[in-house]
Structure formats: C-alpha cells, structure tokens
Image (cartoon, grey):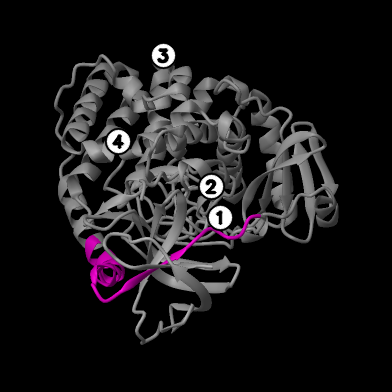
Amino acid sequence: MTGRRDRLPVLVLLVAGLVTGGGQPSQWGLADQAGREARWDPAGQSRQGARWALGGQTEQTGQTGQTAPRAATTATTAAATATATDLVTTAAAGTGTATEPTFADYVAGLKADVARAWPRAGTLFPGADFSTLVLLVSDGRQAAAITAEGATPTSVAEMERRGVAVPELIAPAEWDGRHAVAINTALGRLRFEPGPDGQRIGPVLTVFDKITHEAFRFYVQGFALGPDMVWPSLRAEGRRATEYPLRAAPRLYRAMIYNELREAYRAPDTRPARLAAAAYWAERWAREFPAERRRIAVVDIDAGTAEYVGKSAVAMAAATPPGGRREQRAFLLNELLKPATGGTDSVDLESYPIGLAAGLVADDLGLDWKAAVVNGPDTPLDLVVRGVTPIARPEPAGLRRTIDEQVAQANAEIAMDLDPAIAAFRDPRTALLLIPPPPEGTQPEPRSLSGEYIVERVPGTVYRRFTQKLRVNSGVLEAKELSVFADQVDGVDYTIIPFDPTGGDSPLSGDRVRFTSTDLTGDLQVRAGPMLAGKKTFVAQ
C-alpha cells in the first residue's frame, strides 16, 4: 500500500456550492468551497461551512469526476472535471434567492465578462493569457461559443460532431484548434448574497469566477495538458482531507492568518504589524500541526493561486469603471474578501481565501512570488511572510469560543456518519471490497460527498456521505450517502467498502457479492485481493 495523493479538482472544483447537509456553516464568508456553506466572506466559497467570505468557491461536496481517489499519477484526469459545488454560492440568511438566469442571460453575461477580463488575464499571472480561449456554454439543449471577440451560436449536435460532450459541469475541450472550457449551465441553481455596498455577486459572475478558476487550473497549472505539463510544485504529495475528530486550534490559526492578510491588504498603513501577526499565526500553525501543514501545502498552491486569478478576473469584469486598480481593489474588499468570524470544518476550504489574500498582498509588496509557487515548495503564504518577524496579536473577542462551539457541533454531526463506518472497518469479522476506477475509456459517473477525513488507525481517506454509481466490468455498485474509504493499493486507486461476507445485506457467494441495503446496491464479480490493514480483501472485477 502506498500513500494517496489527492489533487484538487476541481472544483474542487473543487471548487470548492451545494449545501450538503454535513457540518455547520463556516464563517469565513466563503460560501463554501465545495458544497458546504462557508462564512469567510469570500462571497461564497463552498463546502461545508466557512464563515470567511470569498465569493463562490469550490471543491468537495457535489464533486463529480473521479470515482477513486486522485493520486499523483492520475492528477491530470482528476482535475479535468469540476464539481457541481464549485459553481454554487450559498446565500446569507435573509438575503433571498436570485432568479435562475436563462440560457440567454448566461451567454450575454459571460460574453461581457470574458470581453472585459480575459484579454487582460495575462497581467494577473504568467501564462494566463486567455485572449484566445474559447468558452463553450450549453444547457444540454442550446449552445454557444464565446471568445473575447464575441459570442457565436452553435449547437449540441455540432459540439458532439467535434468530439466535445456537454460536461457534467465543467471540463477542458478544444474548439477550432484552440483551448476551450466547456460548461453546463443547466446545473446552475445559483444563489448569491449582496455586498456591503449593495453590489451583487450574481449567478453569472459566480459562474465566470469558477470558469476562470478552472481555466487557470486546466491550462496554466497544466492539469489538462498532460502530467509533464503540471507545475512541479503540484506533483508533490498532498491531500485535502482533515483529521477527524476535528480540532479547533488549527482552524482558529488559519482563520487568523487570513484575517491578518486581509487587513494587510485593506489598510496598507497597518501592513507591517498585520504581516507580523500573520507570520505569528502561520508559525504557530506550522509548529503545532506540522502534518496538516505538509498535507495541505499542495492544495494551498493549487487552490490558492487559482482563487487569486479567478477572483481578480471577477474584479476586472465587475469593477466600475473597468480597468481601474482602485475600483478593482474596492470590489475585492467589498465583495470578495470579508473577515473570518468563525472557522471551517475542512482545512482545504481555507486554501482558497488564504491564497487569494496572500497573492494580493504579495503583489502590493512587489514580490516575485508567482514564479516561485510554480516550482514550489513554498505556498503564497510562505512567500508573503518570509523574513517577517512574528509578533503575537490576540484573536478577536469571542472568535475562539465560536470556533470551539462550531467544531464540537461539527464533530457530533460527522460522528453520526463516520463512526459506524469506522467501526465496520475495524470489526475483525468484516472484509473489504476494493472497487477500482472504471474501465479505460469509460466516463466516471458523477459523485458527491460532504467531506474527506483522515482517521487514526485507518489507512487512506474516509469519504463522508459518498454517492456514486461505481462501474466495473462485472456490474454496477450504487452507493447513496454512504461513508466509504479510499486508498491506493499496489499503485491502484480504490474506493473501499467494509462488508460482512457471511451474510446480512452483503452475502458472498462463490465469486460474486450482492448488496441489497438502502445505501448500497449491486451485484459484482470479485476475486481475492491483497491483505490491507490486516484485513482480507476482495477486488471487484
């Protein structure tokens, strides 16, 4: 067995959206990176719940794409399909829900956003010149090709004739010999919250953010260009998963890192003191939680730089008048960078806003940070606090108590899903079903989950509330909101499910196993597999 290397999708896409029923909202105003409600105020990151606030983040819950964990060898594929969560922004309580745009609304709005921002995206990051990039927009019935020059109607049939399928959500493509990003707007259902000055990050602009975020991952970070084109820094081992049971201290430290970086950007006259405080919290986090720091570094680079580019492009497209740095800065602060008033329940959710804030401050300082993150191993945060003497600064009154309460609540909720699965894994009477990725040339089925966790004495990663049809040559196994495990065994990424081979809802008969429970159904052929964590395994055929 080897260690797993989880890549961001996408969107976390990923992402990352869809509010998944797990975990309390986080207060970084993100509205959740990956499907959960976030409150970091990045106007909606997306995942379980952040209370920081960026605008429309990415990845995990609602993730579509890989059926098995994304390892370093499959990173390109893993990143090539974005998550539904990434494109969903959670509305703040009491703000109401926007009317879903029509297809024509999406085309018109994205045409304007592309024209205003993509020709200038190369000024945001080396290699991010999207002036020739094609955006293929479809709802499964209609289609249009958008470039910086304008929008051209096309059709789903024409897309298919050219070998471009309407994606589950978002995917790289090619059109007229040019790099393209294809997006399915039929899965929108986007909600949004008003900014403090009355401006709004609406559905179309949220989608533009995620398209640009993923375009950067596909064609600048290189995930759609082949393994040899992926940034050296992103080939390192890294994981999105958070240790369970959750602990409050690392979530507090990362919230404070973000808050201090945000203030360093918002008020340049306080920057030296704010960077010193950010350095203090970063040093404390790294010293007290070194394993988490090592695991998340790749995600901090991947998601952090893509978030910086995506949100900066949003500011380019939305600031009035366009092109003015002062207006873009005001838009970022008012709409996309709100203070963290609580914590997240997933470390990777924090990668997005920390990367955004660190990148903006590094720009103000004139640091040559962009070339450095390409090669690694330094993250945007590492580079912006390098050489800064740490100085302790107390957290805001009540923040520690808020995060303590959030973590206690999250642990209680997560336990209802994870504890029975963990007990089944550790039960000496159970065996493990190992389900490999789908057969070569087969498109993975959409998947959703509400969290990725690391558990002591359990190998790999635990996926909470995992839903997906797992296809192998001998049949289909359908999991519905089931907590499962994922790990790499002998170089193959497997979804792993404990089961009782002697009877119950999962009897083994000869070389076949049949599942008939409410959360797991299917009939598969199996063969004896290698021992894993001291347990007998069966590999689905």
Q: Please tell me how crowded label 4 is: few (under 14), some (14-19), or many (20+) other residues with Cα within 10 Å.
A: some
Measuring 26% from the left and 58% from the top, which residue is drawn there?
458
**In the rendering, which numbered label is found on residue 65?**
1
Image quadrant in which you'd find residue 494: bottom left
Q: Please tell me how crowded label 3 is: few (under 14), some (14-19), or many (20+) other residues with Cα within 10 Å.
A: few
**In the rendering, which numbered label is found on residue 367?**
3
Magenta residues, start to end? 411-440
| Lower position in the chain sequence, tag 4 or tag 3 | 4
Identity, as a three-letter code, of the amino acid under mark 3: Leu
Reply yes or no: does residue 414 show up in magenta: yes
Estimate the spatial distance between the alpha carbons at disc 3 and disc 1, rounded to whole Å: 36 Å
The residue tagged 2 is 78
The residue tagged 4 is 294
| Lower position in the chain sequence, tag 4 or tag 1 | 1
Measuring 48% from the left and 18% from the top, which residue is drawn there?
371
Identity, as a three-letter code, of the amino acid under mark 2: Ala
| Lower position in the chain sequence, tag 1 or tag 2 | 1
213 or 514, which is in the foreground?
514
Q: Position of residue 55 (x, y in %)?
A: 47, 44
